[in-house]
Image: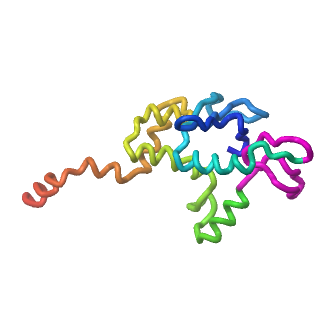
Amino acid sequence: MLKLRWEYIDFEDVGYIFIKSAYQSYRTKQDRSHWVPMTPRLRAALAEHAIRYKGAIYDGKESPWVFHHERRNRGAMPGDRIVSLESAFKAATKRAGIPWGREGGFVTHDLRHRRPTTWIAEGENPHEVQVAMGHAHIETTLWYTYLVKESLRSLVDESEDEKDAATA
């Protein structure tokens, strides 16, 4: 998302973000570009962000980046794209008392897992989730089902519990 350009956001109708592969040495995992629908909340937030930052001029040039520096910051010039949010995430998790790091703590990649996990938990079509996430294989998408323990509850019928208790 830090390489997101304004031209890759479609605010019409539902709203979509175009994930472009092969851009400035960046490639998606499957090396395929694809469209991702925005939630109403994200669409509203990006529309509000656009009012302030779309078309912003720095040193006589318009910044194409959705997320860019407003002022000079550690070598970055105004209008340059933000390269990393890791230090900001680390600071936020520390303030929230959430452990950080690969050994059982939060890492920024965890954010990528939330959306497909939520969609799967809500019973969305796994093929549609696969396309939205840009997964080449349905098996990758179905991996997210293991994260949703609540979905297993449908396998347990209360009447079966009552039968088991009666025979015990």
In which quarter of the view is residue 134 placed?
Answer: top right
Q: Which residue: 56% across, 36% down?
A: 36
Indicate yes or no whether the magenta region holds residue 65: yes
In which quarter of the view is residue 123 placed?
Answer: top left
Q: Position of residue 62 (x, y in %)?
A: 84, 41
In which quarter of the view is residue 98 placed?
Answer: bottom right
Compared across the picture, whether 161 is left or right of 105 comes to left
> Magenta-highlighted stretch: main secondary structure?
loop
Q: Which residue: 67% across, 60% down?
A: 89
Q: Which residue: 88% across, 51% down?
A: 77
Compared across the picture, whether 145 is left or right of 29 comes to left
Report the number of discs: 0
As drawn, which residue projects farthest toward the front? 51
As drawn, which residue projects farthest toward the right? 59
Q: Position of residue 152 (x, y in %)?
A: 32, 49
Q: Position of residue 74 (x, y in %)?
A: 87, 58
Name the colouring of the figure: rainbow
Q: Which residues are magenta?
A: 59-85
Indicate yes or no whether the magenta region holds residue 103: no
Q: Position of residue 24 (x, y in %)?
A: 79, 34
